[in-house]
Amino acid sequence: MSAVTGTRKLALTAVMFVVALGMVVLAAVTKITAPLFAAWAPLLVVPYILTRREPGEEPPAPRSPGKEPASEEVHQEQSD
């Protein structure tokens, strides 16, 4: 699969919502409820699209269980 940039993520997400909306409009126009049952299917793809890493992006570093985030360490030092 090709790399997905931020702009492409936005475009693919918009396309998925347009397809879902099109299914709802189709159901309204034809007075058939079957398209309503398929309208949610394109929306299942949206989380996958939005959570894919962008090109060159490093995977997040694993956190060690005993270490707190740096922002909390700074906050604790200031309160002492």
Image (cartoon, helix red, strand yellow):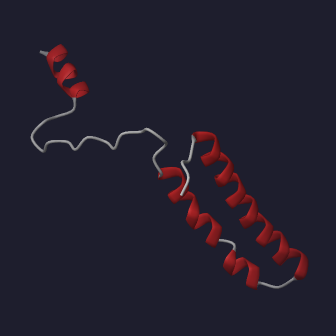
> Which residue sits furthest right?
29
Indicate the quadrant containing the C terminus: top left, top right, bottom left or bottom right.
top left
Q: Position of residue 14 (x, y in %)?
A: 70, 52
Q: Is residue 36 left or right of residue 30?
A: left
Q: Position of residue 57 (x, y in %)?
A: 41, 39
Q: Position of residue 26 (x, y in %)?
A: 84, 74
The residue lying at 68 percent from left, 60 percent from top is 16
> Which residue sits furthest left?
66
Q: Is residue 42 left or right of residue 56?
A: right
The residue lying at 75 percent from left, 59 percent from top is 18
Q: Position of residue 33 (x, y in %)?
A: 77, 84
> Which residue sits furthest front?
2
**Residue 1 or 58: which is nearer the viewer?**
1
The residue lying at 56 percent from left, 47 percent from top is 4
**Residue 46 or 21: which is nearer the viewer?**
46
The residue lying at 63 percent from left, 46 percent from top is 8
